[in-house]
Image (cartoon, grey):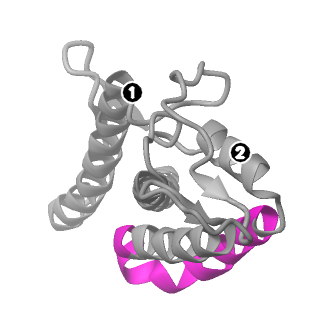
């Protein structure tokens, strides 16, 4: 049973049990709920700052295009990358971002990263760039291909943290319900 205070909106666990059990159980539950509240607050701050976009949010204006070019292009500008190089660097960045954010469950991110890369790897350069700009927070405003790689790393880390937090929240809910 949860008792929610109107003043602070922080759920408190009410458990009729021996004092020693209540202290340990309440501490465990409080830690899980605290993490959940902090994660939600962080997500709201990121959303307000524009660092994270939700599906349907308008994309910021595109700074420049042609940052990802076909592999046959020989006269690359400093801000450009060949498609194959971009995919390779994006895959490494996604692994790095997700792996560092996932902590003890970092080994679980590899299949998700591989699935994402497989979806994008075969696309022509212009289509790949348009998709990354549309789907990766921060990539729409990138003025260089390396800046798009950085956006991929950051977004991958944010998504891994979000999934990890959701798992912690789900476990806290199961504990509270038990």
Which class describes the residues within 10 Å of circle 1: few (<14), some (14-19), or many (20+)? few
Identify which residue, 140 or 162, lies in the foreground: 140
**Which disc is residue 50 wearing?**
1
Q: Classify 15 as above or below 44.
A: below
Residue closer to the observer: 140 or 25:
140
Question: Which residue in the rendered view is the most extreme toward the front?
Answer: 75
The label number, if any, that marks residue 131 in the structure image: 2
The relative height of residue 135 versus residue 155 in the rendered view (above or below) is: above
Q: Give the residue drawn at x 48%, y 61%.
A: 160
What's the distance in space between the residues labelled 1 and 2, CA to CA? 19 Å
Region rendered in magenta = 100-120
x 52%, y 86%: residue = 107
Q: Which mark is residue 18?
A: none
Which image quadrant: the N terminus? top left
Q: Using the rendered view, name the quadrant where residue 74 is placed.
A: bottom right
Identify which residue, 28 or 167, lies in the foreground.
167
Q: Earlier in the sequence, mark 1 or mark 2?
A: 1
User: Can residue 4 be seen in this snapshot?
Assistant: yes
Residue 55, image x, y percentages? 65, 30
């Amino acid at each position: 049973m949860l008792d929610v205070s109107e003043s602070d909106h922080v759920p408190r666990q009410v458990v009729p049990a021996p004092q020693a059990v209540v202290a340990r159980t309440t501490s465990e539950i409080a830690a899980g709920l605290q993490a959940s509240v902090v994660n939600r607050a962080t997500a709201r701050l990121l959303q307000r700052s524009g660092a994270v976009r939700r599906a349907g949010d308008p994309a910021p204006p595109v700074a420049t295009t042609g940052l990802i070019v076909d592999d046959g292009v020989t006269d690359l500008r400093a801000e450009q990358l060949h498609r194959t190089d971009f995919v390779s660097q994006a895959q490494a960045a996604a692994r790095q971002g997700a792996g560092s954010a996932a902590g003890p469950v970092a080994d679980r991110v590899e299949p998700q990263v591989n699935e994402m890369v497989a979806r994008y790897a075969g696309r022509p350069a212009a289509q790949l760039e348009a998709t990354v700009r549309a789907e990766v927070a921060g990539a729409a405003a990138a003025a260089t291909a390396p800046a798009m790689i950085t956006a991929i790393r950051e977004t991958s880390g944010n998504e891994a943290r979000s999934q990890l937090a959701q798992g912690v929240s789900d476990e806290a809910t199961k504990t509270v319900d038990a």
